[in-house]
Image (cartoon, coloured by chain):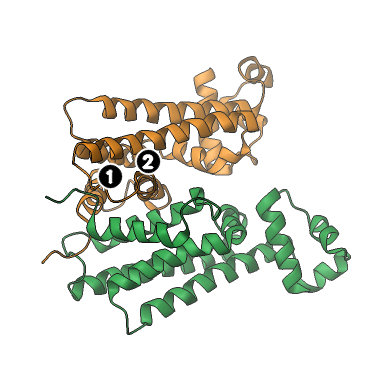
Chain colours: A orange, B green
Amino acid sequence: MKGAIMEQSIELFANKGFKETSIQDIMDVLNVTKGTFYYYYKSKEEVLMDIQYQYINRLLDSQEKIIHDEETSYQEKLHEIIFKLLNDIEKEGLRAKVFFREMRHLTNEHLNQIMEKRDQFKENIQLVVEEGIKKGEFRSDLPPNIVTFGILGMANWSYFWFKPEGPIPDVEVAKIFYKMLLEGIEKKE
Amino acid sequence: MKGAIMEQSIELFANKGFKETSIQDIMDVLNVTKGTFYYYYKSKEEVLMDIQYQYINRLLDSQEKIIHDEETSYQEKLHEIIFKLLNDIEKEGLRAKVFFREMRHLTNEHLNQIMEKRDQFKENIQLVVEEGIKKGEFRSDLPPNIVTFGILGMANWSYFWFKPEGPIPDVEVAKIFYKMLLEGIEKKE
């Protein structure tokens, strides 16, 4: 039941908005009483926290697998992280929507926990950039911090425009972004 | 008075949120009656529309000046557009915040008008990319559409992290992003 409450809440929060969704709305879709809801959750905000928490934890887990893969170069890790973000929008569109859009409705305490994890996600990309510089895979004359924000922006912004049903699939967009980032868009002589 | 209503509303919408701000709140700060408000605006949403409209129109105007400058190359135009976006966050932080965050509270009709202008902003960057490809300034083997989303993402995402009071000023961040985009981050032999 807890899983069902979460799934239905994701749908409702994504389509109607968190503020505009009542606990009654969630219960109506599930066809159960409020008592059932309060058995699992103290509040609507607690459901939102669960959604946010699960979303960012899954992203962090898969990111850490990519980073600690000893078979791949840092360039490949960067490519995989970009792909993972796009693939996630493709596969987990509603969750991504709720994550980005409804974050500000968390309590301060919960928001801080999520922000820490978001920072960790960014730190992990920066680690790939820094290690890649050490290994001579990336140039060393640009500050890794700002480069990382550039990478993150490129990939995260796709949440606002990338449509899984569009003409270019996630794997292609990731490849184009990777080439832009690695090689640049300047025409070489 | 109309200007003052707008300025105060920007502050309130940015700090408290659009939904959480009442017309009474706006009037309290200005120390005038509701009648004054309704003389200039039909609703709170109409104020929001004015804010959104002014923000995107200014951005479009300055973007079009950059594009139609006959003295600059397409590479330089790209650099200037990126700088303009960062500079705008530096100078117009509260407006940018209200623009990005409260857009969804517009009526459908108003939202469509703003979306058209946002699309125009994107189309203008794409034009720079396409013309730059024709002139041999940018590589021709990546789709301009996706490249443009990459540029836009990199620049727009800075709204979420760039702090005017931070250690690296807007002009420096713009230069780093421009170098990343043009030359890529791969280490050249």
Q: Residue at x 54, y 25 (%)?
A: A50
Q: Earlier in the sequence, mark 2 or mark 1?
A: 2
| Element at label 1 | helix
- Left or right: residue B88 versus residue B145 is right
- Left or right: residue A129 versus residue B116 is left
* Mark identifier at residue A89: 2
Q: Kindly identify the amino acid type of the residue bearing the numbered disc 1.
A: Asp
Mark 2 Cα shell of 10 Å, populated few (<14), some (14-19), many (≥20):
many
| Along the line of sight, the residue nearer the viewer: B85 or A140 | A140
| Element at label 2 | helix
Q: Kindly identify the amino acid type of the residue bearing the numbered disc 2.
A: Ile
Residue A153 x, y percent position in the rendering: 39, 49
Q: Which residue is mark 1?
A: A170
Mark 1 Cα shell of 10 Å, populated few (<14), some (14-19), many (≥20):
many
Residue A64 x, y percent position in the rendering: 33, 26
| Along the line of sight, the residue nearer the viewer: A51 or A163 | A51
Q: Is residue A84 visible?
A: yes
Q: Residue at x 24, y 50 (%)?
A: B185
Q: Residue at x 52, y 50 (%)?
A: B166
Residues under numbered marks 2 and 1 in contact, where contact means CB atoms less than 8 Å apart: yes
